[in-house]
Image (spheres, helix red, strand yellow):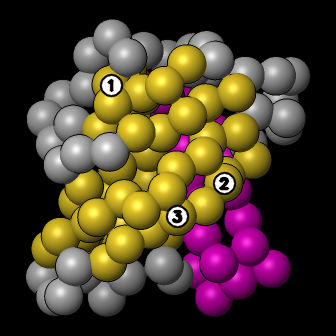
Amino acid sequence: SPTNSGAPNGGNFIVLAADGSGSPIIQITFPGTSAPTTASYTITSGTPTGNQCGFILSDAGSYTAASGVVNVTAAASPGNTATFSGILCSGTGSPHSVSGTIKY
């Protein structure tokens, strides 16, 4: 079954989601060690600050998004959600377009 989590790691807050086989994995990195508040976060390929986040898709390679928006709705865990649509991830193979909602 799919797995998901949200936790502080290395000075950032990391949201992870994987399908039942463990791949692909989506990793969204938010600045700070607290769960992100309700807001729209602009995807950056650099180190996220303020209302920015990082977005990586791992599936037989690593694919990074450089633009797009992740919409976060904050609630008591595990009721937080991160929603995204049409995020273009480029990397070691053909680009992938990723859409979905992660609950953490």
Q: Can the viewer see residue 54?
A: no
The quadrant the N terminus occupies is bottom right
Indicate which disc, 1 or 3, sits on the residue closer to the N terminus. Answer: 1
What percent of the width, then of the height, locates residue 58?
Answer: 36, 72
Query: Tags 1 and 2 in contact by the CB under 8 Å rule?
Result: no
The quadrant the C terminus occupies is top right
Callout 1: helix, strand or loop? strand
Callout 2: helix, strand or loop? strand
Quadrant assignment, res 81: top right
Q: CA distance from mark 1 to mark 2?
A: 17 Å
Residue to which mark 3 is pinned:
99
Residue type at the position of mark 1:
Gln
Indicate which disc, 1 or 2, sits on the residue closer to the N terminus. Answer: 1
Residue to which mark 1 is pinned:
52
What percent of the width, then of the height, locates residue 102?
Answer: 67, 52
- The residue segment tinted magenta is 1-22
Callout 3: helix, strand or loop? strand
In front here: 87 or 30? 87
Q: Is residue 33 above or below residue 80?
A: above
Give the residue drawn at x 44%, y 45%.
Answer: 28
Residue to which mark 2 is pinned:
101
Horizontally, residue 50 falls left or right of residue 79, namely left
Q: Can the viewer see residue 104?
A: yes
